[in-house]
Amino acid sequence: MNTHSSAPHRSPRQGSPVQVAIDRCPLGLVLAAWTSQGLCAVLLGDDRAALLRDLEARLPSAALVAVEPSADDPIARVIALIESPRGAQELAIDARGTAFQRSVWSALREIPAGSTASYADIALRLGRPKAVRAVAGACAANPLAVVVPCHRVLRSDGSLSGYRWGVERKRALLAREAS
DNA sequence: CCTCAGTAGTGCC
DNA sequence: GGCACTACTGAGG
């Protein structure tokens, strides 16, 4: 029995409901999903149905509860963050992933707005200088757009590589943050 | 400009 | 346990 080392960490969310809201933002539509513990998904897109499908694929066994966007809810914080990238670190998050993915996402949150890092930088920071592609994989699996700023990770030569929600959005986010 | 090998995590079988 | 994927990178045509 070796089920403890690499099994994905499951958030304490078995039966607890996940609130879901969709609203407009400067990048199109944004879907935010959260529990009492914090945000578990922030997805960008142009189509409500596609966003919901994406969420359901990511949280297959969650009880989703749709709510109207409200100024008191985390989705308002997320939209404010897109408009002005400050205070992302204060948002509580409740993302599920493997230990490795969570360590990558945690490192990403330490990249300040206005600066960028390469995949190799992140790998180095984690003490796994050769796990470069794995870092890219963890970025690609990031469930929390903008809040976990995977858009600040570029290739070593400075080019943009990919973005789960479209390279154009990555470019737009970086342009907005450029100091 | 291009291709290639090295490399490590993940998902599917 | 395989095995085939990568949002990579540095070296070499």
Image (tube, coloured by chain):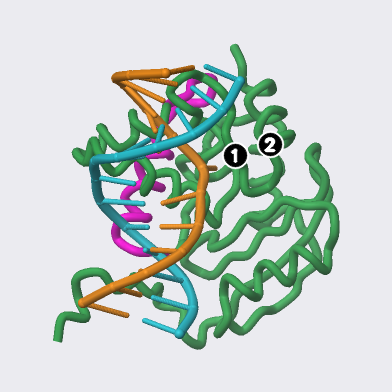
Chain colours: A green, B cyan, C orange
Residue A72 vertical position relative to residue A50 in the rendered view, above or below: above
Where residue C2 appears, as percent x and y from the top left, is: 28, 73
Residue A164 vertical position relative to residue A109 in the rendered view, above or below: below
Secondary-structure class at tag 2: helix
Q: Residue at x 59, y 60 (%)?
A: A41
Q: Nearer the viewer, residue A86 or C13?
A: C13
Q: Which residues are magenta?
A: A96-117
Q: Residue at x 31, y 50 (%)?
A: A103
- Residue A105 lies in the magenta stretch: yes
Write down the chain letter for disc 2. Answer: A
Q: Would residue A17 be found to the left or right of residue A172 on screen?
A: left
Where residue A26 appears, as percent x and y from the top left, is: 80, 37
Q: Residue at x 58, y 70 (%)?
A: A58
| Label number found at residue A86 | none
Residue A131 vertical position relative to residue A144 in the rendered view, above or below: above
Q: Between disc 1 and disc 2, whose residue precedes?
A: 1
Mark 2: give few (<14), some (14-19) or many (20+) Cα within 10 Å: some
Q: Nearer the viewer, residue A156 or A114?
A: A156
Write down the chain letter for disc 1. Answer: A
Secondary-structure class at tag 1: loop
Question: Which residue carries the number 1 mark?
Answer: A162
For the residues beneath circles 1 and 2, the answer to whether they share a chain is yes
| Label number found at residue A167 | 2
Mark 1: give few (<14), some (14-19) or many (20+) Cα within 10 Å: some
Pick the quarter of the image with the C terminus of chain A. Answer: top right
Residue A159 vertical position relative to residue A71 in the rendered view, above or below: above
Report if the CB atoms under discs 1 and 2 are less than 8 Å apart: yes
